[in-house]
Image (cartoon, grey):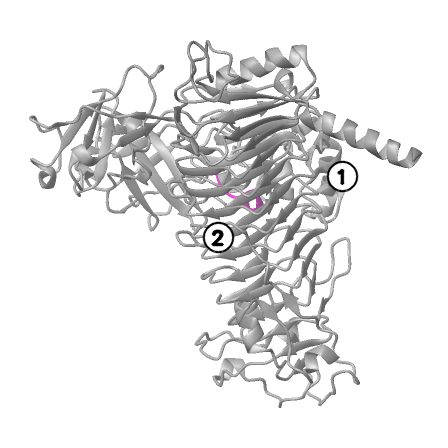
Amino acid sequence: MRGMVGLLLALTMFLSSAAAKTILYVSPDGNDQWSGRLSDPKGDDGPLATLEAARVKVRVLKAKSKDAIEVQIRGGDYQLLKTVVFGTEDSGSKEAPVVYKAFSGEKPVFSGGVKISEWAKCTQDPAGMSPKAKGKLWVAEIPKGAGEPWMIRSLYDGELLLKRARSDSFKYAEFEKKEDSNRQGKKLTSILDYEGKPVPAFDRTIRYRDQDLKAWPNPSDIELILKDRPWLANVIALERVDTENKVAHLAVDPTYQAINPNNRYWVENAIEHLDEPGEWVVNTQEGKIYMWPEKEMAGMKVIAPYLEEFIRVEGKEDGPFAAHLRFEGLTFTHGVRDTLQAEDKGLQHDWEMYDKGNGVVRFRFAEDCELSSCVIKSSSGTGIRLDLHCQRIKIASNHLHHLGGGGIVLSGYGPGTKDVNKNNVVHDNYIHHIGELLLHSAAIFIAQSGHNEISHNTIQEVPYNGIVVSGCRPHEFYLVKRIPFRRAWVSSIRFDECEPYIKKGLAAEWQNRLEHFLPLLHARENRIVMNDISRTLLKLHDGNAIYFSAMGEDNLVERNYVHQNHDTAGAIRLDDNPSFTIIRENVITESERGLGLKGPADVINNFIFTETFLRGRSTPGWLGGTKKALPKGNVFMPPASSKSSNGLYLTDDRAKDKPFYENLPKMEDSIYFTKNTSDPYVPKTGLGNDLFTGKPVTAGKDEVKLLYVDPMFDEDAMKEGLYQFRKGSPAEKLGIKAIDLREVGSSLVGK
């Protein structure tokens, strides 16, 4: 009886605790002077009208009660022209979180854009207009009621990104230009001593040909797209154009000096290049937007993004942190595209910026928060950011698509001893069609952030990398005194914390070893598991579905389905200065190259159905670093249809005459097989032989390195995502395990 009484008492306390929740409502039909306690207007009371008013009301309620608070947001459209900042005073607790969520069955949409209305047919041709556009242009005034003047870099027709006027490609002029220090760090440490005065400021000029550029009266509106490396597309505004000397001056430093006359660039937002239906330009000096519409203007809903950061959850730098805030079921659209500023600090290659408010939803100095079941779409910047101190933040079941920038960024402090961006979860998100304006954007970018779970995400239709895990390459540490203003990497190095490690590296025989700096590199022990990644590198080159460089140790890449990724430098790649990584039970298919490895890795039980097993050097870095590494239990099975000249051979010029296995120091219990009959794919020895020795071996009985034999995959099961073997398979005798990918990727796909 006592037990029953105790159970009833516990149940009563639980129900009492669960019921201790205050509910507020927000509605497009609301009023910020009302109580917010009613879901619909009733007399002189009802829901609130704005998210900001709800935040203020929650803060008042929290001061009076320790109850959990839930803000239910009714369906409809909400315009945001100012960032809503949730601080420590707005936080909940573990027992009583504060939740902002969609009202059941409804869809609240927050837009950071301003409608452009009152379009009129142009009665006077703008100066410089293309003859093709004569009689076709419409014009509208830039709205003045939105607040501060802003640079319009993108426009939408509802959810559709409109095409800004763009030139054909141009080439730089042939010119003997003195090279400055704006090059990759690994090319500078051999010519710049560590000690010395800072080098001169980078050259921001471009020499152009013929009449390719003009002395536009609104140069800050005009942007150049610079593709000076295969892996980057800078978008930089002009400062001025010197037509007498044919020199264009950029507003900020490019990531790399524009000096190769064979490289191409493009001009955007110049009236001369508005020469096709669907294009537009803006002239802030005139205060006007010009458009050649593809359809009737009356049927268009033109939106200009105004706000870049919609929601920021931000505590104090060293605590207290904003905590226990959740956002569920909300939709965000029409955010501003990021623009490079002189004060920016860049992550690797300027693929993203360091600690910058360019994400629609941003967590900074935050813990134990969540963003789930939200949609970020038709927005010109990055989707979600977790900056500096962020721990136990959950980003789950969100749909991010048609973004101008990246998907999700986890960016801790710059290289140094402060390791506080970790233990976050990025799970079950569907990310596709990102990087529409900034082509080098990644779907998921992890910089100086560790111990995170990146699981069950689906990534598709990406212009460059799928997932990036990055730290800082050794060369960059040696440049802090000579090029302190270098945006990418160097500017975020915490010098006082790093100096002892720099001195240790300088005293070493091999200065550019990552081991000197591992304690400063915090992108370690991340778990990248059960992700479905396809159709990356649609616009840029020298990239990968999953990419690593100069990161911390023991990152795990496991049971990912990596497919339809073409022109990669290895679908999964360890680029310059990687540390020990575990690559296990992944399936790579429909790609030219399987792995690209420049450092030590455990490569275990992977099934690689690509033309080339390794994109690498003549002696891949299987061994070395701080840990021993061994490829074991892998199946390499190039497709029968492949016409590559590589096949069994490495892509490196130094090893084209050798099969890849002759360059490996070790391999165990692995299988090679193909039905491809062309010479590069057919081993010089027969079926049943070990390719390392050329001698016959028996699986399960003899020692095997790389056995030339049919692994006997169950092709029917493979169609369902289960990569298992038929009975009697030699793979099973070698201890190679089946890989079950039936649950890979996000549950949101197809919904």
Residue 632 percent across, percent down from the top left: 72, 69
In the image, 378 versus 486, the foreground residue is: 378
Tag 1: Cα neighbours inside 10 Å, few (<14), some, or many (≥20)? few
Residue 130 lies in the magenta-colored region: no
Q: Given contact means CB atoms under 8 Å apart, are the residues at marks 1 and 2 in contact?
A: no
What amino acid is found at the position of numbered circle 1 in the picture? Lys
Q: Tell which residue pokes out farthest to the right in this image.
A: 2
In the displayed structure, would residue 245 be above or below residue 287?
Answer: below
User: Disc 2 residue type?
Assistant: Val
Taking the image as shown, residue 722 lies to the left or right of residue 265, namely right
| Residue at image location 27% in from the left, 47% down from the top | 169
Where in the figure is residue 689, as x and y percent of width and height? 68, 87
Q: Mark 2 — residue?
A: 749
**320 vs 703: above or below:** above
Q: Where is residue 698 shown, x and y percent of the image?
A: 74, 87
Q: Residue at x 44, y 54 (%)?
A: 537
- In this orientation, which residue lies closer to the viewer: 65 or 319? 65
Residue 705 appearing in the image: no
Q: For residue 185: magenta?
A: yes
Residue 487 in the image: x percent, y percent? Answer: 52, 32
**Seen from this angle, which residue lies furthest front?**
1
Quarter placement of the N terminus: top right
Q: Secondary structure at mark 1?
A: helix
Is 486 located above or below residue 608 in the figure?
above
Camera sees residue 582: yes
Answer few, some or many: residues within 10 Å of disc 2's Cα (few below 14, many 20 plus, some between 14 and 19).
Answer: few
Q: How many marks?
A: 2
Task: Give the labeled residue for mark 1.
Answer: 504
Q: Which residues are magenta?
A: 182-188
Looking at the image, which residue is at 48% across and 67% down? 590
**Residue in front for this viewpoint, 486 or 335:** 335
Disc with the residue nearer the chain's start (1 vs 2): 1
